[in-house]
Amino acid sequence: MITVKDLTKRFGSLKAVNQVSFEVNEGEIFGLVGPDGAGKTTLMRIICSLLNPEEGEVRIFGLTARERDKSKESETSNFGYMPQRFSLYGDLTVMENLLFFGSMYKLRKEVIIQRSDEILELTSLMEFKNRFADKLSGGMKQKLALTCALVTRPNLLILDEPTYGVDPEFRKEFWKILYNLNKGGMTIVVSTPYMDEAELCTRVAFMNEGRFTALDTPVGLRKNFPYQVWELVSDSREPELFGEVDGVYDSSLYGDKYRLIIDAKTDAKTVIEKKLKEKGLTSLRMQKTSPSMEDVFVMLVGGEG
Ligand SMILES: Nc1ncnc2c1ncn2[C@@H]1O[C@H](COP(=O)(O)OP(=O)(O)OP(=O)(O)O)[C@@H](O)[C@H]1O
Ligand SMILES: [Mg+2]
């Protein structure tokens, strides 16, 4: 559905997107994750042809942006985009915002009104139809932004961190909507800072400094994680306890539990026990565990991996 080939975008000397190639298949929920400044927004804006790359090309439905403009099929091959910093009109109601965004896509008013029932139902905003956008909660504003992106009835939806900063309950609800849209045949590309959301994608691309550093299914990413992960509960609460230990690439303390990412060849048990003994500590519980998406993220972004 989307083919990206050798894409490079420069801002001065900075390569915000650096030789990126990948495909998104029809029916996928394709996740894009990476730290601040990785190039996610830039990549999405190029896909939506809001930015021109210096090198490479993007095809959607087999067509470049120029070919799409000429094509008569644009009615069936359109896409929706929800930008990272979406601005709604606070002094317009939910319905008026929808009318406004629909009209920007040159949709006739009757068509927008016809469609609004369906999409307001989908995003469960129907009962807030006449509320001013300013009076909506943060989560609901994001839902309205999604609603506006749906007004063209896209079969491809591109969402840039749509759940950033909203509460977990709402994030769940938002993803339920995405799953429903996807079940109805919509292909989705979504960036997210949340690893639990990355887990919900068909495939996930990790982006760092303009490049893709990994691309696989969530299961594949965890299965091919080339390190061992250990959990340890001890009587220590010292965050840096394992900071300098050979073979330990990352250590974090959550409450009373350390999570350690350790070199695959290291005898982890011995290394951990040695450190504890040195400090006169004891282990209350120590076990090897399976890697999480968070572990994968930590190593791809900051680790030696
Ligand atoms: N219009 C621009 N002019 C100059 N530099 C830019 C421009 N847009 C983005 N950049 C730079 O390009 C890099 C990639 O930015 P981008 O916004 O694509 O990252 P991101 O992964 O979306 O980050 P975030 O998670 O913060 O949204 C950053 O270093 C950013 O400062
Ligand atoms: Mg961004």
Image (tube, rainbow, N blue to C red):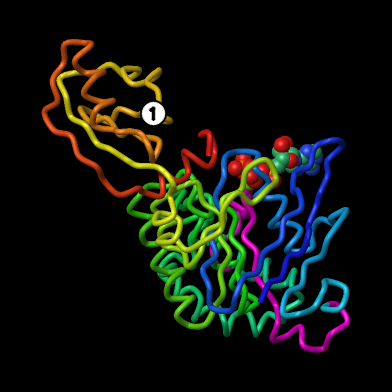
With 155 as the anchor, is 21 left or right in this view? right
Query: As displayed, is residue 171 above or below residue 123?
Result: above
Q: Secondary structure at mark 1?
A: strand
Q: How many marks?
A: 1
Question: Residue 15 appears in which quarter of the rendering?
Answer: top right
| Residue position for label 1 | 248
In the rendered view, does 70 fall on the left or right side of 243? right
Residue visible at 16% across and 11% down in the picture: 280
At label 1, the amino acid type is: Val
Where is residue 187 shown, x and y percent of the image? 56, 74
In depth, the one of 106 and 16 nearer the eye is: 16
Q: Is residue 60 on the magenta stretch?
A: no
Q: Residues within 10 Å of mark 1 (few under 14, many from 20)?
A: many
Ligand 1 is located in which of the four quadrants? top right
Magenta segment range? 69-95
Examine the rendered structure and indicate whether residue 16 appears above or below residue 147: above
In the foreground, 211 or 75: 211
Residue 250 horizontal/vertical position (percent): 41, 30
Q: Position of residue 181 (x, y in %)?
A: 48, 76
